[in-house]
Amino acid sequence: MMNNINMMSALPSFESDSILSQMSNALLRPDTRCAELTLLFERATKQDLQTIFPILVDNIFGPHGTFHWNLRKIHAETHTTEYNSIMNFLKPEGVLFKQIYILLHDITIKYDFSLAYLPTKVRLMLEGSNVNPFYNEIIQYTNHQSGRQLVSLLLNPFDYYIFHFVYHLINPCHQRVLSEEHWNTVYYNLCSEYLLHFFPTSLNVPILPVITFYHGKNPIQSTQHVFKPYKQSTLLKQNLFGDPHINDMKVMHQHIEKHPRNEIWRSETILMAIIDLWLSNDQVCSQYNNLSTATNYPELPSGDYIRIIRVVVKHLHAFSSTAKEDNSSLGELKKHTLPMMQSRMYVFLRNLLHRWPLDESFRLVLELWLSFIQPWRYAHDTYNEGGGIYKMIPASSSPPDETVKYADENTYIQFIAENLLVYIVILQQLLPRFARIDLASPKNAQMLFRLTKVFNQPNLVSMLKKVESLVENKNYSPTHHSTLNYSSILPPLSPTSRWSTNNTTDIYSSTHIMQDISSDNVHPANFFGSGYDTFASKYLNLVRQKIYELEGPNFCYKPMFITQTAAEVYELLKLTKSSEIKAVALLEECKTAQKNDNGLWSFFFGPLPSQDEISLQDRLKAPVFLKSSADFLIEMFQIKDFHNFDVTPEKVHELSREDTIMQDNSYATILTPTKVKERLKNMKYEGDPDLIPIRSYEIAFLVRLLYVFACNINQQYGNHLSRWYYNHGFCGRFVSNFLQDPMQAFKFEKSHGSSRRVMYHLPPRVSFRKFANKSLLSFLALGTLLSVWMQFGWSCFIMGYITINVLAALIRAVFRTRVVPTLDLNFNDSLD
């Protein structure tokens, strides 16, 4: 921001001042600002554009938490005119991008992007020695006595806009002011537009406009190795061919104009910004071991954040699906797109699953994960036939089955091998959640159905078995040491008896795996066919390397499909069957209630309000979802002996009464919607009463002002107040009428990396919060007006009010007996 102010002060010309004033006036009129800015750009010079561009970007996105254009709240349904004007102004071929390309003609135009906007992990990477080559060209240092110090990123106009656009989604200043009712906003659709434009899924489609003039992303040193020095041996040759240095520079500039990065550097910028800002966001990827990097962010990202990430995953799958057929420079980027985002996506999903609550909104995260592990659903032909991004069903509803394309082993086996942990470990982390929720709820049943249906696709489980067979063996000794170790930002896994744990000592070793396989007299090579050895030699090191990179050397991988089925799967299957019977019973109750409502009362006055918040149509779906889920689980894990589990309707009541699935500590009590409501009713505030959130019947600024006033008195005279309160005589009884009683309060201590409920003591103290009550203030105002109207004066009423309260305190002090605590609490005890 200081850089922008310095640029403004460095331009004393009348024209520049006029341009700035015109732009300021245009930005104050939201209805016409885009049209006025368009006219302003037509009259502005290149120097004027250079000056006003960073000011305009700051005004659009408000990176400092100041005014912005509300791109994440404006939607076409209710803001049609403003929505269309902003979309036309900011779209890839819109007015603003035309000005950006004008500024790109001058390679020296750069703007500062603050490092404070970058996630902690990215800042640490830039400060370290292993800097991503993408940032080598844009890092700005300053020289100090202690050495070079990283200051900011120095970005060209295109990169500056894109980085601000991407940061706007994760800006902590804009997280708590969003409405979740509408997801089809300007920001969401701009993300879709940018993806479609800069990551074309069709072959031989150039990114418009075609840039051949910008050399800022093509460093000269990257082309020097292509040319050999031109040696001159005689003066005659030098005279015939002219100056050799001039000829070399001409050839070099011709090469630069045709440099392949001219075609892809814009797409590369967007891809790196998305990966480094959205998938490494501190709001999601918390540092579990490094407590110094803790930041005060909202508990969870917003719903539109997850939806946008899912759109990115879908489109990048489609973009990468044509890499083999594309021989252009863009084809090289397609080959590296998924490998660049896979590791970040694993960390991102692990953290989301660990922190997301047990409610129906988890469908957003579930669908994001399912989209990532099914690249075949978004292959080029299927994706384009479905209409791309705009025709895709949002995460809150089911995707159409007719667009599903099953996995082909020859095409997708490498993706599965590279992302084995994304399939297996996240599945192991996810399945225990379904044992803690009410599966009879239609939306919860639908989530389980979606999960089991995806894993029951043809070829998927068989490919996972083949890849899992490469992980565990007696000679497992990974040799690859990655500098990007994500173990510090990965949450712990569920400590179950058979599934994966971090740093475990109970290793489910390869010996057990071989025993399980040999128990059926099956050798891995025979089991997977004659081509197993070729497959193992091709993917063995790849699988081990990925596991070591993501989870570290102490991670114990425990397979799911090449060993005996885990007990947790049987328990989930048992719960699914019992929930199916429960869902049928709830459906019958819903039908009976609906029949009873069809009487004379409902004919004349409408139906009675139902106590069941779930409609009959949704209740009809739950048993179907649960039955299909159970069948899918049986087929996934090849379970042949489930008939031994006798789940009858008589046992459903017993299961619901016990309300637990297992008797060990691995599973918590099942949370149903009814129990959640009961918990909310029984919840009470246990902290400092003066710090209760401001109520609707209170005046906010008075609450804060009176709290500061009371804190100053308590801090200065706290010991005196405590001594008077604990006085056993008349004085103590009198003063206690005006003081708050000592109490034990609770707070959550988060400074040690975990949330601990800590008890602390509040001593006797004064509190003036009741004087911020609107009712009391209205009474005092009305009494004062009546006193003035009756010519007694306002002071007479105030003195009368004080006198009545003092007399009441005296009477209570005379007739009141109280037990004074023997523990003498000082005011400083509240800080313990």
Image (cartoon, rainbow, N blue to C red):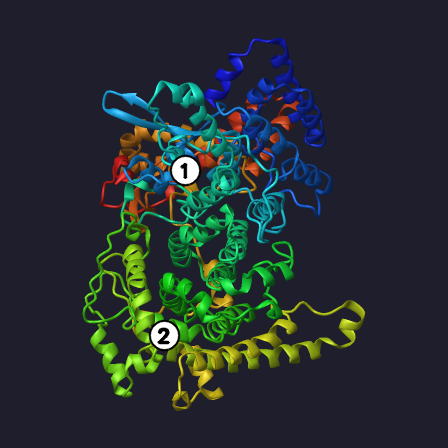
Which residue corresponds to mark 2? 465
Q: Residue at x 49, y 76 (%)?
A: 458
Is 425 situated above or below 101? Answer: below
Residue 82 at what x, y percent from top left? 70, 38
Is 622 situated above or below 15? Answer: below
Indicate the quadrant where residue 589 lies: bottom right
Residue type beneath disc 2: Lys
Disc marking residue 204: none
Binning the other alpha carbons within 10 Å of mark 2 as few (below 14), some (14 to 19) or many (20 upward) gives some
Which residue corresponds to mark 1? 118
Residue 101 at what x, y percent from top left? 58, 30
Query: Relative to 659, is 17 on the left or the right?
Result: right
Binning the other alpha carbons within 10 Å of mark 1 as few (below 14), some (14 to 19) or many (20 upward) gives many
Query: Relative to 290, is 593 on the left or the right?
Result: right
Q: In this rendering, does residue 583 appear at all?
A: yes
Of the two numbered discs 2 and 1 on the same chain, state the one appearing first in sequence.
Answer: 1
Residue 640 at what x, y percent from top left? 40, 88
Q: Choose mark 2 or mark 1, whichever is in front.
A: 2
Indicate the quadrant where residue 115 lies: top left
Distance, label 2 to label 1, CA atoms, is 39 Å
Mark 2: secondary structure: helix
Indicate the quadrant where residue 564 lies: bottom left
**Count of residue discs:** 2
Q: Residue at x 40, y 83 (%)?
A: 638
Residue 406 at what x, y percent from top left? 52, 71
Foreground of the two, 253 or 538? 253
Query: Relative to 701, is 830 on the left or the right?
Result: left
Q: Quadrant of the C terminus?
A: top left
